[in-house]
Each structure stands twice: as structure tokens, then as C-alpha cells.
Image: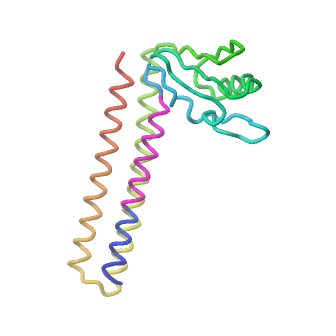
Amino acid sequence: MTQEEIDLHIEEARELMEHAIEHLKHELATLRAGKASARMLDGIMVEYYGVPTPLQQVSNVTAPDGKTITIQPWEKHMLAVIEKAIFEANLGLTPVNNGEMIIINVPPLTEERRRELVKKAKAYGEETKIAIRNARHKAMDFIKKAVKDGYPEDMGKRMEEQVQDLTNQYVKKVDELLKAKEADIMTI
């Protein structure tokens, strides 16, 4: 096996780790931290002419202030469909349909709910760390196989150290993201 093949596998592991971090950022953005945010509704799908469609593709979703989210659908007949989808998403939010738009008043979080959200954030973080470790495992296995097939052992050790350093960097990023989100959630 060549150095280029090993470098390619290490780069692939880095890309998988980066993808895991991006996924974590997306998941953390959907957790509400007491302030209203249009991103809180990112995962909601609505039935649009028989096709499940992201809410943002059938309406304008905004957070005009820290306590309110407004949803202005492109087509009026979507009001009831959007309202139903928000109820079914079970986000603990109550949409109010005024005939023109949907308004959601975001209630302040209770201490108990904040702790639940921190637990959820930590669970997302653990899933991300598992994905990062899986990417490391895949690269390490390839390096070990290369050493078995005649690649110099000292070079293999250096490559393994490089993969471990990369893993440590990404795990640190996960910890930093979680710490920031926890502080955001627990801030009243």
C-alpha cells in the first residue's frame, strides 16, 4: 500500500469527523434555549400537495423577538396544515392561527425542562463522539492492514498518531460545542 492510499484514508476519516460535527451543530440548533428562534422549527415537515416538505420551503419563518416565532405561509390553505404539523412535532409549543399567519409564543423554560434539554444535548454529543471514534477506527484498521502488508512499521505508528491527534481535536470540538450550548440553555 502506498502513502497516498493511507493519506486518502486519513483524509476520509477527517471528512467523516467534520460531517459529524456539522450534524451536531444542526441538532444543537434545534434545541431551544429559552429564546425564540426560527431554527427551532427546522425539522418540521408539512404535507404540501401530497409531498412531505420542510416548513421553510412553504412559508417564511421568522423570530421577530426573543419570545415569538411567526410563520407566514406562501399559500393561505397551508395555515391549518402547518398548525397541525407543529402540534404533531410535540415541541411543547402552541401555534395560534390568526387567519393570516401562525404565531407561536415561546414560553420561558422551567429549570426541569432546561435540565432535560442539557441531557438531550449531551446525548447528541455522545452520538457525535461515537461517529468520530468510528471514523478513527476505520482509518486505524486500514493503517494496521497496510503495516501487515509491508508498509514500514514506524511510518504506520506515525500515521496512527496522526489519526489519534485528529480524533482528539474533533472530540475537543464536540466538548466545546456542548459546553457553549449548555451555558446557553441554562442561562435564564
Tell me if residue 124 comes above or below residue 71 in the rendering: below
Residue 13 location, quadrant: bottom left
Magenta stretch holds residue 106: no
Give percent across and percent down for residue 23.
46, 46
Tell me if residue 4 comes above or below residue 55 in the rendering: below
Which quarter of the image is occupied by the N terminus? bottom left
Please name the residue shown 42% across and 52% down the image: 130
Q: Identify which residue, 52 or 114, lies in the foreground.
A: 52
Give percent across and percent down for residue 80.
74, 22
Tell me if residue 163 comes above or below residue 65 in the rendering: below
Residue 122 location, quadrant: top left
Please name the residue shown 32% across and 49% down the image: 171
Give percent across and percent down for residue 28.
44, 35
Q: Identify which residue, 16 or 73, lies in the foreground.
A: 73
Magenta stretch prevailing secondary structure: helix
Left or right: where 188 falls relative to 153: right
Magenta stretch holds residue 27: yes
Q: Which residues are magenta?
A: 14-31
Left or right: where 105 falls relative to 14: right
Q: Identify which residue, 121 or 9, lies in the foreground.
A: 9
Left or right: where 186 falls relative to 81: left
Q: How many marks?
A: 0
Please name the residue shown 39% across and 53% down the image: 18
